[in-house]
Image: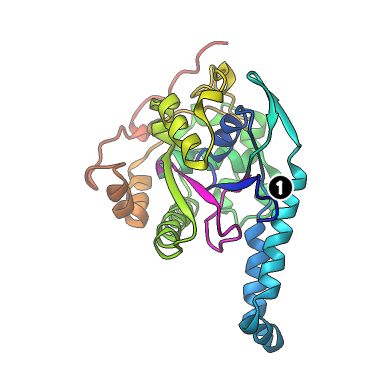
Amino acid sequence: MIDEDKQIFCIRGHMKSGTNWLCRLLNLHPEIFSSGEYHWESYLRTYLDNRKMFRNIDEIETESALIRHELQQMAYRTMLKLSDSTVTGESGSAAVKLIGDRTPTTIHPVVFRDAAYLCMVRDIRDIVVSKVFHFLNSPRVMANTNMAAEVAGLKPQFDKDPWFFHKHPAKLLSSERFVRATCRTWRQSIKSNQNTAKNIKSIRVSVLKYEDLHENLDSVLEDALRFIGANPALMPAIPRYLQPGHRDENPNKFNRKGQVGDWKNYMTGRAKKWINEECGNLMLELGYIDSFDWSFRDITKQAPPQRRAA
């Protein structure tokens, strides 16, 4: 570590798992500065790939691991420079001691090898719903992702009417390829983090469930602060805009709804089958379902929900 008075911590998790919300909550603390997404792991993956391809690099690293060390130090230095020397919150001004890197990805490859890692986990059923809205709202994300044509084809209707899926809820999870691909990356992400936490002893990992943060915000946040080394007594009151959920749904905004169980408004029998086949076992392991025969209201057989008047 370059500055012994400052410590790095990391926020990780599959996209749409609440990493951004957790980051904003932690930034209320006067000793914390957290930001992202820098994807330092992409630099390290390039290094690892080059070791496999180029003999001279592998020979150098076998002796000294110099390149990897310098890449890690570059990431450290950059995070230190990105953080201000002080941060002002409701409790006043204090020197920043904890610098967070928020990136919705896996812990591996490990860039910050002596850091604490907060890993967000969320019900895959809510993730896949949120991900459809996120992709349709973010052309840059859509352009850089192998998007299912069936989902991309819905963008004109969604752009014309942000409440399109309220009127046609069965269409939201209609793409088998999109649903299955999201389930696979969710499963792979969580399993990767479990394996990394088990095999790399120099890091500390704490798993936070999005649903627990909703239900017990103060206590879960206090545990997270203690885990990364912050004093919970310095945490100010949480403002309304960072409380669980949003007052109104905004389908064409980044902060769309922020609720637990929104999947119930869009689930179909076909989507349930795809989700079970791809990640049912992990849902059981994490306690999101009690059996593969989890109950739901098939929205293909129901009238669409009514939007609350503004």
Above or below, 254 against 100 in this view is above
Q: Which residue shows up at 53% across the image and 17% down it?
A: 247
How far across and how far down the image is residue 126, in percent? 44, 38
Tell me if residue 196 is in the magenta stretch.
no
Q: Label 1 neighbourhood size at 10 Å, few (<14), some (14-19), many (20+)?
A: few
Q: Which residue is at the front of the view, 217 or 202?
A: 202
Tell me if residue 113 is in the magenta stretch.
yes
Badge count: 1
Helix, strand or loop at label 1? It is helix
| Colouring of the image | rainbow
Q: Quadrant of residue 207?
A: top left
How far across and how far down the image is residue 79, in percent? 71, 48
Q: Is residue 210 visible?
A: yes
How far across and how far down the image is residue 268, in percent? 36, 40
Q: Which residue shows up at 40% across the image and 57% down it?
A: 194
Residue, far top = 310
Task: Please state, as top left, top right, bottom left or bottom right, where the C terminus lies in the image.
Answer: top right
Q: Which residue shows up at 41% across the image and 62% down it?
A: 195
Above or below, 143 against 108 in this view is above
Q: Main secondary structure of the magenta part?
A: loop
Q: Which residue shows up at 34% across the image and 45% down it?
A: 272
* Amino acid found under the numbered disc labelled 1: Arg
Q: Can you identify the residue that label 1 sits on?
A: 140
